Image: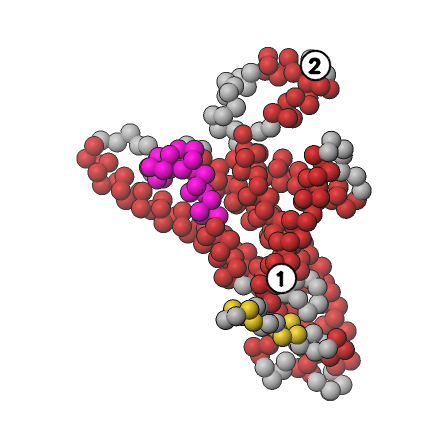
Amino acid sequence: MAGHGDDFFHHVRDSQVFELPQFLGGDLLLPKIGDWQLTKFMVLQTVAAVFVLWVFRGLAKRIASGEPAEGAWWNFWESMALFIRDEVVRPTIGEGHHDGHDHDGHDHEGDDRHRGHGHHGHVKVALAGHPADKYLPYVWSCFFYVLICNLLGAFPWMGSATGHIWVTAVLGIWTLVVVIFYGSCELGFMGFWKALCPPMDLPFVLKIGLVPMIWVIELVGLLIKHGVLAVRLFANIMAGHTVIATILGFIAVVGHSDLVYLVAPASVFGQVAIGMLELFVAFLQAYIFAFLAALFIGTAVHPH
């Protein structure tokens, strides 16, 4: 690594091979399918998608059967899904005008009536759901997909696909498409674009100049927000793996000199410490991506 500075970035670069140690057979070259070359990040993204599908199909079947999800494994995934629903999507997107209640009073009499039915009343309220729940599938998908992609980078000889700008760019672009779609469903196609500029009580002459200018600024802001969404995830994941690779690279730099006995233990300890921090960052960045996606959806469907 000392002679090839670019190798510090191999863990966050896409590649046609999985770089395995010699005792596992050396580098594993990925095949071509016709003219289409498989790459490492394609495989890792597929693994993440299949894993998320397998986990939540199994969890959904258990819950649909009427039985609680039992066991540490299923409770772990269920608790994270409920956290995203109850602490991110519902409070961030809100109820809007769909709840059918008076927004100032929230129909406390109706709530008391449900509470008066005891346990069964609470079941009825839970089954009624929340207006923001229809946006849950996308936010859930973002959170768990990004999380698994991040965590795959913690395994030796793999990598984090979310450390590649084109991967996160697709996630950002797709989130923009989803925001426009949900906003158009809620406000109408033209209504969504008109809502980019808030209503202003101004003289007509001022509106002629200000409204188009503010609309363009808001449109540019909409695009920039989703661009930043992609860059934020990419930068944080790439930076963490680059730091780990750099710290371990100190061992190669000192080579066979006597300093290796001092540098090697310090580098390994530093790598372990940064690795533990990276596990936290993997969850944190998935949470931030899901939170911002929910925030952008909420802004689109409830613009004012």
On the image, numbered disc 1 is attached to which residue?
44
Start-end of magenta stretch? 175-196
What percent of the width, then of the height, locates residue 118?
72, 16
User: Mark on residue 117?
Assistant: 2
Q: Is mark 1 on a helix, strand or loop?
A: helix
On residue 300, which mark appears?
Answer: none
- Secondary structure of residue under mark 2: loop
Give 202 or 55, whichever is nearer the viewer: 55
N-terminal label among 2 and 1: 1
Looking at the rendering, which quadrant does residue 44 occupy?
bottom right
On the image, the x and y values in percent for residue 301 come to 45, 35
**Is residue 120 found left or right of 92 in the rendered image?**
right
Q: Which residue is drawn at 62% across and 69% down?
A: 11
Residue 278 sits above or below residue 112 on the image: below
Mark closer to the observer (2, 1): 1
Which corner quadrant of the image does residue 196 belong to?
A: top left
User: Which is more toward the observer, 131 or 218?
Assistant: 131
